Image: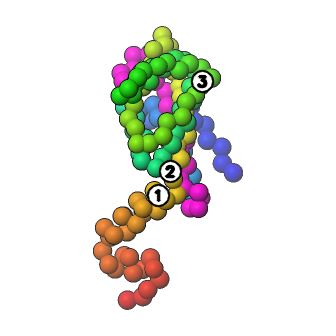
């Protein structure tokens, strides 16, 4: 088991964001945790929820405005919402100090399988053969 110090990892990134990914669970789909800090002077950031994904957005500290095509609302420390894809939304820190949020993103197993299949089809035949265990 490994412990990740998310605030330090996010701080080291120019975007103020760190993504922790579970890539070993092939039967349940992919699971990501995104930790992000928005500074007080942070400009709007656009986030996208892909088709076949759902995200839980949770505010750890501060107050953040969420804008979608249809509405806008604010979420504060300890509040969360769920967004199903496909969707686009913008986030903006509306706090005098920094705000921190996490996204927990789950990709549907079927959608992930489709993405992997599409990537395999783009590869040359030699690479596909070796992944199938066929020797040339």
Q: Please indicate whether residue 45 sits to the left or right of residue 11 in the image.
A: left
Which residue is drawn at the image coordinates 49% and 27% (left, top)?
37
> Distance between the Cα atoms at labels 2 and 1?
6 Å
Q: How many marks?
A: 3
Q: Please indicate whether residue 47 sits to the left or right of residue 22 in the image.
A: left
> Distance between the Cα atoms at labels 3 and 2?
22 Å
Q: Please indicate whether residue 109 sits to the left or right of residue 127 in the image.
A: right
Q: Earlier in the sequence, mark 3 or mark 2?
A: 3
Q: Please indicate whether residue 58 sits to the left or right of residue 126 in the image.
A: right
Towards the viewer: 86 or 90: 86
Indicate the position of residue 102 as horizontal and vertical percent values.
54, 33
Q: Which residue is mark 3?
A: 79
Task: For mark 2, give the secondary structure.
Answer: strand
Label 1 Cα crowd, 10 Å radius (few <14 / some 14-19 / many 20+):
some
Which residue is drawn at the image coordinates 59% and 57% (left, top)?
28
Task: For mark 1, give the secondary structure.
Answer: helix
Q: Which residue is mark 2?
A: 107
Q: Magenta stretch: residue 37 in it?
A: yes
Q: Decide: is 91 above or below 23.
A: above
Task: For mark 3, give the secondary structure.
Answer: loop
- What is the span of residues highlighted in magenta in the rendered image? 25-44
Indicate the position of residue 62 as horizontal and vertical percent values.
54, 18
Q: Which residue is mark 1?
A: 112
Cβ atoms at labels 2 and 1 below 8 Å apart: yes
């Amino acid at each position: 088991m490994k412990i990740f110090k998310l605030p330090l990892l996010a701080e080291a990134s120019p975007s103020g964001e760190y993504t922790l990914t579970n890539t070993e669970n092939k039967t349940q789909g992919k699971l990501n945790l995104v930790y992000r800090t928005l500074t007080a002077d942070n400009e709007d950031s656009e986030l996208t929820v892909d088709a076949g994904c759902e995200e839980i957005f949770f505010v750890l500290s501060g107050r953040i405005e969420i804008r979608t095509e249809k509405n806008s609302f604010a979420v504060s420390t300890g509040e969360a919402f769920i967004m199903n894809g496909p969707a686009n939304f913008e986030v903006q820190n509306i706090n005098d100090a920094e705000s921190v949020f996490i996204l927990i993103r789950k990709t549907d197993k079927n959608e992930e399988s489709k993405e992997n299949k599409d990537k395999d089809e783009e590869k040359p035949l030699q690479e596909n053969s070796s992944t199938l265990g066929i020797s040339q």
